[in-house]
Amino acid sequence: MKPFAIAGVSFWPEMWKPKKNLDELLKHIRQAAGMGAQVIASCEGALDGYITRDLATHKLRLQDRGTKGYAKRLEKFRTRQLALADQLKARYIPTVQAEAAKLGVHLFVNTLDRRRGKSVYNTTFVIDPTGKIVGKYDKIHAAFEVVNTLGKGHYVFDTPHAPIGVLICADRQYPETARSTALAGAQVLIINSYGMSGEGANERFIRQRAYENGMFVLFCHPGESVLISPEGRIIAATCGWENVVVRTIDPNQAVGRGCFGDARMTATYLTSPDHPGYAQRARDRSKRNRSK
């Protein structure tokens, strides 16, 4: 693998306005490509505007289930969501595919994806430099997105640049999600997000996911894009007035396979079990707790 340029695109998409969002997305993708980016990722809901935010307005949160009129409100929202998802599939996603082919870049773009029947997923589309959709990742940890069907697995997408894993927003809060992609060989992890950003809990999540798995992490949010090194260090981020960050990374620096540290530490971690004393201490502690 050779070093390559990766970019995060950040802007605030508007709910239910795919045409306006498409124009913004393409503008920033072109900017990133003009800066040399070969792999470009968007925030969550880049085309639909992350319409899950509208569920609270219509009293369609998990805690609203069983309230008066819930079924009718849900059906009305689903009808509108399906119409939007059909528009995206027919007009807007093909336009993004054409742009990938025109610029010769890999795109990781998140929006709604309608499939069988009335199933709609929160999906990151993986589009290669010919404009072909070569893969999809569906958000798994999204029970609160009551109108979306949940994903069922983690995937790693092989590109000429590096094996790349994908998570979406809340997925990043669970160590097992990133670990699954690392164990499958990912050297880079892209996180398309709309939820919390900035310092504090979010920064701890994304830095930890990079460190504990020894891989690069690119976090893309409407308010910021942040690139993390395999050591868990922030190496690039957009400022308040920027929409695009581009940096060249060397995937060979990623340890990968769910391990942190250098290659020797990796080998030890994979082949050496925990000292049996750890297990014994855990059993003793459990026994003391039960006797109290």
Image (tube, rainbow, N blue to C red):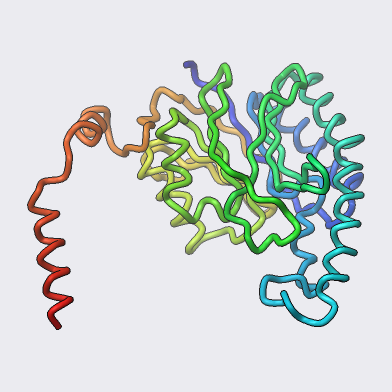
Q: Is residue 251 above or below residue 232?
A: above
Closer to us: 216 or 70: 70
Whether residue 164 is visible: yes
> Which image quadrant for residue 143?
bottom right
Residue at the location (77% across, 67% down)? 55
Image quadrant in which the C terminus is located: bottom left
> Which image quadrant for residue 47?
top right
Q: How many marks?
A: 0
| Residue 119 x, y percent position in the rendering | 77, 47
Closer to us: 47 or 237: 47
Closer to us: 196 or 84: 84
| Residue 148 x, y percent position in the rendering | 73, 54
| Residue 44 x, y percent position in the rendering | 69, 49
Residue at the location (83% across, 34% down)? 93
In this rendering, position of residue 210 left or right of residue 139 = left
Closer to us: 133 or 131: 133
Residue at the location (41% across, 22% down)? 252
Whether residue 238 is visible: no
Q: Is residue 104 above or below residue 259?
A: above
> Which image quadrant for residue 131?
top right
| Residue 21 x, y percent position in the rendering | 85, 46
In this rendering, position of residue 282 left or right of residue 106 = left
